[in-house]
Amino acid sequence: MGNCLIAQSGGPTAVINGSLAGVIRANQLNKKFDKVLGGIHGIEGVLQNKLFDLTNISADEVNLLRQTPSSALGTCRYKLKRDQAEDFETLNKVLQENNVDVMFYVGGNDSMDTVDALSEWAAKHGSNTRFVGIPKTVDNDLVPPDHCPGFPSAAKFANLVTRATAFDYDAYTRPEVFVLETMGRDAGWLAASCCMSGVVDLLVLPEIAFDKQAFLNEVQKHMDEKNSCYIVISEGARDAEGNYVAAGESANDGFAHAVLGGAGLALKQMIVDAGVAPRGVVQDLSRAARSSNFAMSKVDYDEAYELGLSAHMHACDESFTAKVVGVKRGENANGEYAAEIFTDDASKFANFVKAFPTDWAKANYAGITSEAEDYFAPLIKGEPKLEWGDDGLLKMVKPFNLR
Amino acid sequence: MGNCLIAQSGGPTAVINGSLAGVIRANQLNKKFDKVLGGIHGIEGVLQNKLFDLTNISADEVNLLRQTPSSALGTCRYKLKRDQAEDFETLNKVLQENNVDVMFYVGGNDSMDTVDALSEWAAKHGSNTRFVGIPKTVDNDLVPPDHCPGFPSAAKFANLVTRATAFDYDAYTRPEVFVLETMGRDAGWLAASCCMSGVVDLLVLPEIAFDKQAFLNEVQKHMDEKNSCYIVISEGARDAEGNYVAAGESANDGFAHAVLGGAGLALKQMIVDAGVAPRGVVQDLSRAARSSNFAMSKVDYDEAYELGLSAHMHACDESFTAKVVGVKRGENANGEYAAEIFTDDASKFANFVKAFPTDWAKANYAGITSEAEDYFAPLIKGEPKLEWGDDGLLKMVKPFNLR
């Protein structure tokens, strides 16, 4: 029997280690591979033969891995390009030397492209190594899955903070805007999800060209009505010319601010400069949204782990390569949401970005439609039972890349 | 029998409604007062006779109030000044009209000064109304209590985010600094508490004059050693001349940035401009730290409620006025942390600010001493059992100021 290898790539999430735990545990339940090797810092570390033996970590550690955020193997931003033959040869050599039959790669669409490219190279060069992708992304921008591990937990955390900060904001009487910023450079899924909190007045998405005057008019209406306006903006919001709100230059007026922060700060300043509100508060969720393991969605916690289990199970089939496992939206016998695991070609995940549907956004920045609510609702449900330490913080494993 | 009145003031916290719930529940257990009236928006609403009858809210609502963040009665920034006779007369009229025997005021040191001033005025003018303070503050800057409700939950949330984001940050290899900013304009308690996460490299407090070059030298050492440096800064950090780091002007050099954000963004920019690190990530906890009810400390959750109960119990003594209830650090029979409730004169709480002890900070921004760790450790322990809704979010009550 040969070994398998698993590595993580791209931006970490709260549950990406759940998929890692799933692959490790599946191999403990059905020892298809002699060893489960972890590639440190994604493809970058694999190229340098930086591997860590994960085969026999304890059941306790598997369990704690599921509640450890970030990428326990370390991550990378390195993209394998199809024309860099040297990288493919080096990688093949490392995989051969380590007797790797299957490499699992956990990541976003770039990583799924890597799975496809490596499979293609292997077929062309007579290598038997197989490649399997496990998707994750806080941005939720992958096709064809219904959604990807990492996003539901980020959405749950974002909604919890949105509702809590809205209550904080509503306790005051003075006129003021509140601006919450989320990650999402090209896809507004996370920002849009915040509307599930029921407290968002206005929503600014990258998918809908930002019209400064139209937007300020809407803010003015809320200020006139109730002296407050709770706004959520995605970091990548931009106008019709592609100018980012975060760049801080209000098109067609004399203001040009040297904004060191992001879209939230710039939007607040734009509103204040326009005299629509005398002041504002900004809450940038930043990295906390994708890493906050103490607010994971149970659906996400379960699905990330089960995708790892399923990837290993499918990989037992020796013709399974250039494939990715993913989640489709299904129903259980009671008509409730249930994840259906499917597999498809890596090439179908590789080169597309799934934008938030513009017809799921209400006109005039007024939030999301009931279709969008129906989509988000099941994803943020449930709270996994987590293990807390005597120090009052969540127990975690020490990341493998730091051992 | 007369009535009692309770109002909330200053910045909200995750548990300030716990003290409100405590007063309401105590009166349901021992009906000393005919009615428990809530003053909407603190003293500001009381002056306008904006009251809400809380006497008979359900046990369910009392329980949900304990997990509802912010100030459910609304808050204010209005400070009653001793020379504004008109305010005292108006307030006295409202209290007389509503047959108020005791007014409870939940707030920080300004509010405790209000309790003192109102008691003094009542004594001078032959009024029998009594005034009792219940402390709260996310800044933890009140004397004489060991700590105040609101702070422990903020510290727990801050530590959870610190540890989660540090793991996220550690997953990468590229050289970069990470800067986390907390609230705390004059007191560095919340920033200092983040060191309980065990991942903080450098800590910048308002209590210790910021020395740019000395600080940059320390950052450089961490970058040289491991290509990373996790920094926590309190919003009010400043240099020996009193210039705030947040102002963004690096003393004694040519840089002067128009920083719209706070201390974190300015510090990151300072480090990048100095060439100590090529880039950085900023996480500003902002309002989330004081409002995140989904990460409350059990100690805080319990103490806030019990201070409310205790305030009501003490107020049954008809000589009890111009007093505040607070928490002292005690020990149970097993030698473990236990809160001891004490009472003292409001005047002792009113005009002092408790800074983080500078001898609890290690030299060279290197974090906190074991004395500080011993102080923080029990405060962030334990997780209350919370009620979650079917929507995947925490159940809350609708704030009284919005009904």
Image (tube, coloured by chain):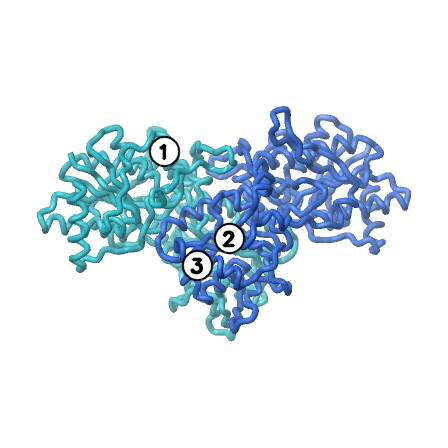
Chain colours: A blue, B cyan
What residue is shown with label 2? Answer: A202
Residue A244 in view of the camera: yes
Relative height, residue A167 to residue A264 (above, below): above
Identify which amino acid the numbered label 2 is placed on.
Leu
Query: Pointers 2 and 3 in contact (CB under 8 A)?
Result: no
What residue appears at the point 23 percent right and 55 percent down from the top-left corner? B80
What residue appears at the point 21 percent right and 39 percent down from the top-left corner? B4
**Disc 1, SS:** helix
**Residue A218 picture location, percent across and down:** 49, 57
What residue is shown with label 3? Answer: A280
Residue B205 in view of the camera: no
What residue is shown with label 1? Answer: B61
- Left or right of B144: which side holds A92? right
Callout in the foreground (2, 3): 2
Q: Quadrant of the N terminus of chain B?
A: top left
The chain ID associated with circle 3 is A
